[in-house]
Every structure is written in structure tokens, then in C-alpha cells.
Image (cartoon, rainbow, N blue to C red):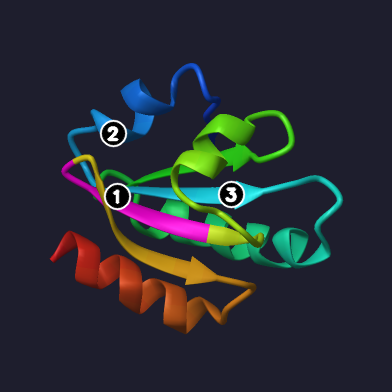
Amino acid sequence: MGHPTNVTDSDFEDQVVNADTPVLVDFWADWCAPCKMIAPIVEELADEFDGKMKFTKLDVDSNPKSAMAYGIRGIPTLLIFKGGQPVDQIVGAVPKKALKSKIEAAIA
């Protein structure tokens, strides 16, 4: 079972930028209601794409450096990294289908 792992400013480079597989980073915060709405969808997709894509979560309140480095202005924002670079961005609580198609494009 794949579950999103928590990343921090200190291990972001190791966990995301230097990853061998594409990585989805869910930028979120505890007070953000739409973040809580999208979280179960991210969990389901982490199961579906286990082994093909790594799923991570970054709390923007505790880790402002990474959020600022990638220009995260609103949350939830999901960034998909491939080869150490962001290749796609999803802002807001989007339907599972929309998120799944972005993931499929990134791992194709």
C-alpha cells in the first residue's frame, strides 16, 4: 500500500528532487479545508500508482522554504516532479479524474 510520506525543508531535495521516480508533492496546511478534501483522493492515488510514482506531503506552515522556492501561493497545490523538475501543477481541490490524468501523463 502506498501512502504519502511527509517531507520537510531539510529532506525535500533528497526525497523529491533526487528521486528516481516521478514525485507528487501535496503542499498543504492543517487549517486548510480544501486540503482536507483532497487528502483522501491523494491517498487513493498513492495506492493506485504505488511503485510508479512517489507521493509526498509538505506542510507549508512548518516548511515555508520549499513552498517559497516553488512559488506556492495558494493551497492545496500539487506539484508533479520528474527528473528533479516540476513538470505539472494542480491548484485547488480538483476531481480525482483530473488528478489521475495528470499523473498518468507524468509517468507515461
Judged from this view, the residue extending furthest toward the top is 10
Q: Which residue was labeled with disc 3? A: 27
Secondary structure, mark 1, is: strand
| Amino acid at circle 1 | Phe
Quadrant of res 93: bottom right
Q: Position of residue 64 (x, y in %)?
A: 63, 34
Secondary structure, mark 3, is: strand
| Amino acid at circle 2 | Val
Distance, label 2 to label 1, CA atoms, is 7 Å
Disc 2 to disc 1: CB gap under 8 Å: yes
Name the N-terminal-most of marks 3 and 2.
2
With 102 as the anchor, is 39 left or right in this view?
A: right
Distance, label 3 to label 1, CA atoms, is 13 Å
Distance, label 3 to label 2, CA atoms, is 15 Å
Name the N-terminal-most of marks 2 and 1.
2
Residue 17, numbered label = 2
With 64 as the anchor, is 35 left or right in this view?
A: right
> Relative to 101, does residue 42 appear above or below in the rendering?
above
Q: Main secondary structure of the magenta part?
A: strand
Is 36 colored magenta in this rendering? no
Name the N-terminal-most of marks 3 and 1.
3
Q: Position of residue 6 (x, y in %)?
A: 56, 31
In the image, the segment drawn in magenta is: 78-83
| Amino acid at circle 3 | Phe
Q: Residue at x 44, y 73 (%)?
A: 99
> Relative to 73, does residue 65 appear above or below in the rendering?
above
Q: Quadrant of the N terminus?
A: top left
Q: 54 or 74, which is in the foreground? A: 74
Disc 3 to disc 2: CB gap under 8 Å: no
Q: Residue at x 22, y 40 (%)?
A: 84
Q: Residue at x 33, y 73 (%)?
A: 102
Q: Which residue was labeled with disc 1? A: 81
